[in-house]
Amino acid sequence: MSAPYTLRIASSLADISAADWNACAADETGAVDPFLDHAFFAALEESGSAVRATGWLGHHMVLEDEAGTIQAILPCYLKSHSRGEYVFDAGWAEAYERAGGRYYPKLQASVPFTPATGRRLLVRRGPNAADVESALAQASADVTLRRGASSLHVTFCTEPEWNLLGEAGFLKRTDTQFHFENQGYADFDAFLAALSSRKRKTIRRERRDALEGRGITIRHLTGKDLTEEVWDAFYAFYMDTGSRKWGRPYLTRSFYSVIGERMADRILLVMAEREGRYIAGAINFIGRDVLYGRHWGAIEEHPFLHFEVCYYQAIDYAISKGLSRVEAGAQGEHKLARGYRPVATHSAHYIADPGLRRAVADYLERERRYVDEAIDELGQLAPFRKGDVETE
């Protein structure tokens, strides 16, 4: 790059200090999203979860000024596959390779295995932040071409970043998730009061049937509660779900030990206990104003326990802590009936080959219209009251 910035590629988190990384990742209040924290990325790497051997070779783009100070970072990986991303491009790869192209390796700017919206262009706060952000966006496209990668995919970025990347030549994509939005509810009952009578009764019945008469107790574990024995139990749940849903779980057992050591106060495990042992659980990460639900699993099947542990307990916790929303992970229209609303997610894609770019651009234009329409239609199905207050 031309002055005043230079770009270097870091293949390991060890090549970037935690202080520099987090200074770039910090928001306007100085807080760092749990999924953008150096500790989270380092845990993925040190545990062998996101490394070359699993198809996630670090290719982090680091923008430095003339004094050698890191001004911006794009967390990025050189990938040999499209697994663990939650924004699906396998169809693009198949079509390109049928036409004689080589889709892999590609570049992936994301938090591995984590479909949560957050900043991707990590820029140190300062008077020139907007210029630095634009420089990083343009540099990332240049790196894609120089590296000979087919494409660069910036997934689950913020909407302002999405627009900026669009101006830098990236194709724009949307998808849908379901989030709970806290409207200042005093407690869970106040949330229920905002729902239609039928949905209110359904949720109360599901919560009751999940626990009553089954000898199941719900426990919230965080901080010093997160012992190795607890992680052993939770990892068994994760392995069961992962093996059934995608064949090979992405995260290693040691990943949980590392985050339990370094991020314990930012983790909430909701665990279901029966007859002295844990039988199910969900892991959540606690942001400044958001609770992020991630993995769930169980070694016993009980009706509605999934909804209780993953969705209702998360809503209850967010309300009690005054958090503004719960992000419950990718997909899942069943969340709609549990008080979660449809929202758009954003990704940006730089495609090097002009032919592939034209084909993908045409597809994405139609897909964006479909997503907009789907969000509107799903929003009409939300369980919230319309009009006057209903009685039981």
Image (cartoon, rainbow, N blue to C red):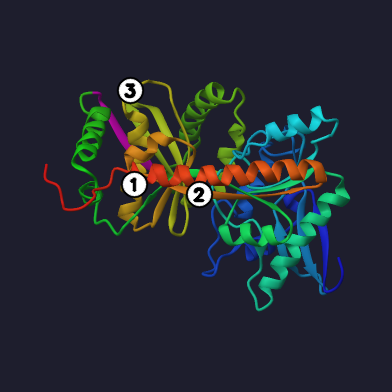
Neighbourhood count class around disc 2 (C-alpha, 10 Å): few under 14, some 14–19, many 20 upward = some
Foreground: 131 or 207?
A: 131
Q: Quadrant of the C terminus?
A: top left
How many C-alpha atoms fall within 10 Å of the one at disc 3: few (<14), some, or many (≥20)? some
Residue 183 is situated, as x and y percent measured from the top left of the image, at 31, 57
Depth check, front residue: 244 or 225: 244
Residue 191: x, y in percent?
25, 50
Which amino acid type is marked by label 3? His
Q: Mark 3 points at which residue?
A: 302
**Element type where label 1 sits in the image:** helix
Q: Give the range drawn in magenta.
A: 214-220
Q: Which of marks 1 and 2 is nearer the N terminus?
A: 1
Query: Crowding at label 1, few (<14), some or many (≥20) Cα neighbours within 10 Å?
Result: many
Q: Give the label, 1 or 2, closer to the camera.
A: 2
Task: Tell me whether the residue at label 3 lies in contact with that at label 1, contact meaning CB atoms closer than 8 angstroms.
Answer: no
Tell me the element at label 3.
Answer: loop
Name the residue: 16% across, 51% down.
389
Along the line of sight, which residue is nearer the eye, 195 or 1? Answer: 195
Q: Earlier in the sequence, mark 3 or mark 1?
A: 3
Q: Is residue 61 above or below residue 50?
A: below
Gap in Å between the C-alphas at discs 1 and 2? 20 Å
The amino acid on which the numbered mark 1 sits, given as a three-letter code, is Ile
Residue matched to label 1: 315
The CA distance from mark 3 to mark 1 is 20 Å
Q: Which residue position holds label 2?
A: 344
User: Of the residues shown, which amino acid type is indicated by label 2?
Assistant: Ala
* Any part of residue 39 in sight: yes
Q: Residue at x 37, y 30 (%)?
A: 306
Q: Does the magenta stretch include residue 215?
A: yes
Looking at the image, is mark 2 or mark 3 earlier in the sequence? Answer: 3
Q: Nearer the viewer, mark 2 or mark 3?
A: 2
Q: Is residue 143 inside the magenta stretch? A: no
